Image (cartoon, helix red, strand yellow):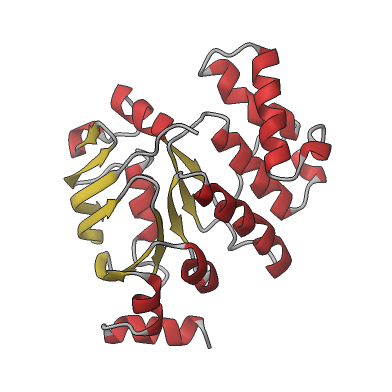
Amino acid sequence: MMEAVAVVVRGLVKRFGSRSVLEGVDLAVAPGETVALVGPSGGGKSTLVRCINGLTSFDAGEIRVGPHMLRPQDSRCEGATVRRVRRLFGMIFQDFQLFPHLTALGNVIEAPVHVLGLSRREACDRAMKLLGRVGLADRADAYPRELSGGQKQRVAIARALAMQPRGLLCDEITSALDPELKREVLGVLEDLKHDGLSLVVVTHEIGFARRSADRVIVLDAGRVIEEGPPEQVLNNPRMPRTRKFLSQVLA
């Protein structure tokens, strides 16, 4: 595994028209750290990780991913800096975003062949190891329509890992899955944590945050309202808004 990298976000502001989604967010993720982003729906969690990955532009502030800096004028979802950031941090989405016309193996080898320039044989060797890593070596020839939701999400994780990133941004990747399938996917993330990848996980799975996160950050109305180790934030939150959110999620 390649060395993990840090992420530092300072004063991040994002507006959609007259609506502010992120209001001066500061965030730091140490190399190899697992951070769980939790909070009420609409609080800005998904927008934050999309800004870090260069998928969404922002209006003020700056984002440093390893040695690469994104500023508002650099964050238009294109350009060399954004491409370098995406090489360092892979993104996994709630809706899988697999190519329906490609098998599981085809989905995993697509970027290594066309972006990294690997030979098909090299890419297939790497992909089969990764599909084995996520428990799907026997489903390499299956198309997305033939896979369960949990299997699709594990293929998506293998696809992200095929680019050999230093970290992963995970945006509610279990929210569309039933409890058993959620455990499959979260188990893979917990395994990756032990490999030293930096992980930023947007989640409502409080059990995962409690068990696997090094730090929990609570976003509400576009602001970080609380952060700290899981035992402090989840067991003894300081802020009334955090207590209210947890009481609703854990009810």
Instruction: Locate residue 61, reporting x and y percent.
Output: 16, 47
Using the rendered image of the protein, determine whether residue 172 is visible from the camera's viewpoint: yes
Image label count: 0
Asked if 160 appears above or below 229 in the picture, the reply is above
Instruction: Locate residue 17, reporting x and y percent.
Output: 25, 54
Asked if 81 appears above or below 38 in the picture, the reply is above
Q: Quadrant of residue 7?
A: top left
Q: Residue at x 43, y 36 (%)?
A: 166
Q: Residue at x 69, y 46 (%)?
A: 152
Asked if 208 appears above or below 81 in the picture, the reply is below
Query: Is 229 displayed left or right of 208 in the figure?
Result: left
Instruction: Locate residue 93, reporting x and y percent.
Output: 53, 48
Query: Is 141 displayed left or right of 121 in the figure?
Result: right
Q: Residue at x 73, y 35 (%)?
A: 104
Query: Is 227 displayed left or right of 164 in the figure?
Result: left
Instruction: Locate residue 228, reporting x and y percent.
Output: 30, 69
Q: Residue at x 71, y 37 (%)?
A: 131
Using the rendered image of the protein, determine whether residue 16 is visible from the camera's viewpoint: no
